[in-house]
Image (cartoon, grey):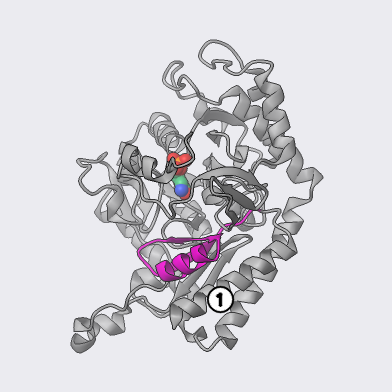
């Protein structure tokens, strides 16, 4: 291209305005936790491409496995025959799935497609239609998954009518109830389970309801882990009412929370597990795992698609699983998580603006920072307070300050939340650098 060619300006003109974008950088190169732009700017990446490049950008073993597969067969179409790299991937996946009963797989390309596959499975297997989702959930932007998504109205706004048969119920997050941060979590769990039971009595009968769909750690809705007692309660409700429990681990899966899947920590068995993002470290691959019995209830021909479980992406995914073992990635997640959380807690205690940090939460390297900017019921009960203009959000300002300092960091949800989702193999030094940039950016934004 000509020396004066402005790729970002060209992109702004020729790419849909429907995409929201954090920055105008043009990414050309990525290695580990670093991205280099077309202008030679080196960015420290605390987003991992929204929790995708869990092993860092262009992990050499993943790149090598994909390159090798490119020389063998790239499109081993699954409605025509079996794909050798997909069979190999299933062998590698079975031992790391969160329950031995999840022994049958279906692969797709994106997270949203996998969520849709899970809904189709639940409907076909139970012969029931309705799905219960959680307030604050995010499951994608396709026509069906926009209906399941309840983190922000923007995903459905103006796109309706959306898929019917979706009912949202409470998730035990204090901000959903307008309660303070120190509200007893078990009380929130009791309230939320009560609401789920009422949903089945007042809104959608068990005989019409196929499944409860939940992210074990709410992602786009604010980085809120589901307490283990809530997951156990949902399992019990599902068993009592003959519903399937579907866990969407698109963002929380593949080591993100310190275990291979977030639901593992609770010991709860999902009937269907949805995965994507981290599985192939940047190659488009997603899928669902369920029991052989449930998956056998689907009619041959009802599932599949041109690129379902692409051969190159499957080869990359097998290399990802091998690298997790060889490079002790989960050990690093535990150490770096402690480093990040203790830094954020010390910032909360010691910074002159620390009072603006209301909550530091999450698991592993899926860490959210909630600013003290969430309206509470006390505010809305108070007529005078209700007329006071809601303070400007802090998170977007911190994001902008980080960008000025060449660091990529994302905010999330309608609440004032920032999320750290770095590569899981980030080094101690790199994370310390990120913490330093974060401190400067936070203090500049808070001033
Ligand atoms: N489910 C969850 C929990 C997600 O976080 C996402 C993506 N952020 C999706 C589904 C949709 O995945 P995709 O963007 O690959 O369609």
Q: Is residue 399 magenta?
A: yes
Q: Residue furthest right?
A: 326
- Left or right placement of residue 99 versus residue 177 in this view: right
At 55% across and 42% down in the image, what residue appears? Answer: 277
Q: Quadrant of the C terminus?
A: bottom left
At 37% across and 40% down in the image, what residue appears? Answer: 10
Q: Which residues are magenta?
A: 395-423
Q: Position of residue 111 (x, y in %)?
A: 47, 39
Q: Is residue 190 visible?
A: no
In the figure, residue 87 lies in which quadrant? top right
Confirm or reject: label 1 Cβ below 8 Å from ligand 1.
no
Q: Position of residue 55 (x, y in %)?
A: 67, 47
In the figure, residue 153 lies in which quadrant? bottom left
Q: Is residue 300 visible?
A: yes
Q: Position of residue 334 (x, y in %)?
A: 71, 62
Q: Position of residue 309 (x, y in %)?
A: 55, 26
* Residue under label 1: 440
Work out whether 302 lies above or below 266: above
Q: Nearer the viewer, residue 380 or 393?
A: 393
Q: Nearer the viewer, residue 377 or 56?
A: 56
Tell me the element at label 1. Answer: helix
């Amino acid at each position: 291209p000509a020396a004066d060619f402005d790729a970002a300006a060209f992109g702004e003109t020729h790419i849909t305005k429907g995409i929201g974008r954090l920055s105008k950088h043009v990414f050309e190169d990525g290695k580990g936790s670093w991205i280099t732009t077309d202008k030679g700017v080196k960015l420290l990446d605390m987003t991992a491409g929204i929790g995708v490049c869990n092993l860092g950008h262009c992990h050499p073993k993943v790149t090598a496995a994909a390159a090798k597969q490119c020389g063998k067969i790239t499109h081993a179409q699954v409605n025509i025959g079996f794909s050798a790299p997909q069979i190999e991937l299933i062998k590698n996946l079975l031992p790391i799935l969160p329950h031995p009963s999840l022994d049958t797989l279906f692969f797709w390309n994106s997270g949203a497609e996998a969520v849709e596959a899970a809904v189709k499975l639940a409907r076909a297997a139970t012969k029931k239609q309705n799905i219960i989702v959680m307030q604050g959930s995010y499951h994608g932007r396709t026509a069906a998954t926009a209906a399941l998504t309840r983190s922000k109205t923007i995903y459905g706004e103006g796109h309706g009518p959306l898929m019917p048969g979706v009912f949202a119920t409470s998730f035990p997050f204090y901000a959903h109830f307008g309660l303070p941060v120190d509200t007893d979590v078990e009380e929130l769990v009791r309230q939320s389970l009560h609401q789920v039971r009422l949903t089945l009595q007042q809104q959608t009968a068990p005989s019409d309801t196929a499944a409860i769909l939940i992210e074990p750690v709410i992602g786009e809705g604010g980085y809120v882990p589901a307490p283990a007692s809530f997951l156990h309660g949902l399992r019990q409700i599902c068993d009592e009412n003959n519903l399937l429990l579907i866990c969407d681990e698109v963002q929380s899966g593949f080591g993100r929370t310190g275990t291979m899947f977030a639901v593992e920590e609770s010991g709860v068995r999902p009937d269907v597990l949805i995965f994507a993002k981290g599985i192939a470290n940047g190659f488009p691959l997603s899928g669902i795992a369920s029991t052989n019995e449930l998956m056998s209830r689907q009619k041959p021909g009802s599932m599949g698609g041109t690129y379902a479980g692409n051969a190159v992406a499957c080869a990359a995914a097998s290399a990802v699983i091998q690298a997790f073992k060889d490079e002790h990635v989960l050990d690093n997640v535990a150490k770096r998580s402690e480093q990040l959380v203790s830094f954020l807690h010390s910032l909360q205690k010691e910074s002159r603006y620390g009072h603006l940090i209301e909550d530091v939460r999450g698991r592993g390297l899926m860490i959210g920072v909630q600013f003290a900017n969430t309206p509470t019921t006390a505010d809305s009960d108070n007529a005078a307070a209700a007329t006071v203009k809601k303070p400007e959000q802090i998170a977007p300002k911190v994001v902008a300050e980080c960008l000025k300092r060449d660091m990529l960091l994302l905010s999330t949800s309608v609440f004032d939340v920032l999320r750290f989702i770095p590569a899981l193999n980030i080094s101690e030094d790199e994370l310390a650098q990120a913490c330093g940039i974060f401190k400067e950016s936070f203090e500049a934004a808070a001033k």
